[in-house]
Amino acid sequence: MHIVATGSCALIAGYIYAKEKTRKRAIIALSAGALAMTVSMVIMNLILTPLFMGAPIEVVISMLIPLIIPFNLLKSIINATVTFLVYKKISHLIKR
C-alpha cells in the first residue's frame, strides 16, 4: 500500500512542480500529492484490508471517516511539509 501511495504522491507532485519551479507551485504540487496519497490509501484500504485481514468491507467503510481518512491525511500532510522544508537544501544531492 505504501508503495502505491508514495508513488501516486511523487508522480502527481513531480508533474505539477516540473511545470514551474516556484515556491507557490511547490505548495500546490505537494498539496495535490498529499491528496492523491490520501485517496490512494483509502482505495487500497478498501481493497486490501478485507482481503488480508478478513474484515468485512462494511467494517472498513465504517472506519473511513473516523480513522482511515484522518490518519492518511495527517501522514501525507506531514510528508509534504517535511519535503517542502528540506527539498531545496538537499536537491543538489539528488541532481548529481
Image (cartoon, grey):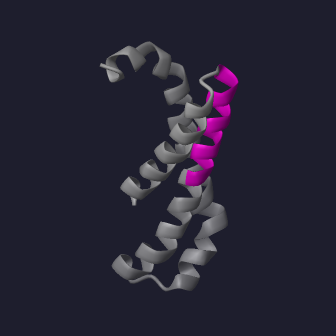
Indicate the quadrant where residue 54 lies.
bottom left
Q: Please report the residue visible at 47 percent of the width from the left and 43 percent of the height from the top.
A: 10
Is residue 71 something one can see in this rendering?
Answer: no
Name the spot of residue 20 as percent of width and height, x first. Answer: 63, 27
Name the spot of residue 9 as percent of width and height, x first. Answer: 51, 47
Lateral position of residue 13 relative to residue 89, left or right = right
Indicate the quadrant where residue 78 lies.
top right
Is residue 96 something one can see in this rendering?
Answer: yes
Q: Image height check: is 3 above or below 63?
A: above
Q: Which residues are magenta?
A: 23-36
Q: Please report the residue visible at 49 percent of the width from the left and 46 percent of the height from the top.
A: 11
Q: Which residue ends up furthest to the front in the rendered image?
A: 19
Indicate the quadrant where residue 89 lies.
top left
Q: Image height check: is 11 above or below 19?
A: below
Based on the picture, tell me whether residue 85 belongs to the magenta stretch: no
Name the quarter where the C terminus is drawn.
Answer: top left
Q: Nearer the viewer, residue 47 or 57?
A: 47
Q: Image height check: is 39 above or below 26?
A: below
Q: Image height check: is 31 above or below 53?
A: above
Name the spot of residue 56 as percent of width and height, x first. Answer: 49, 86
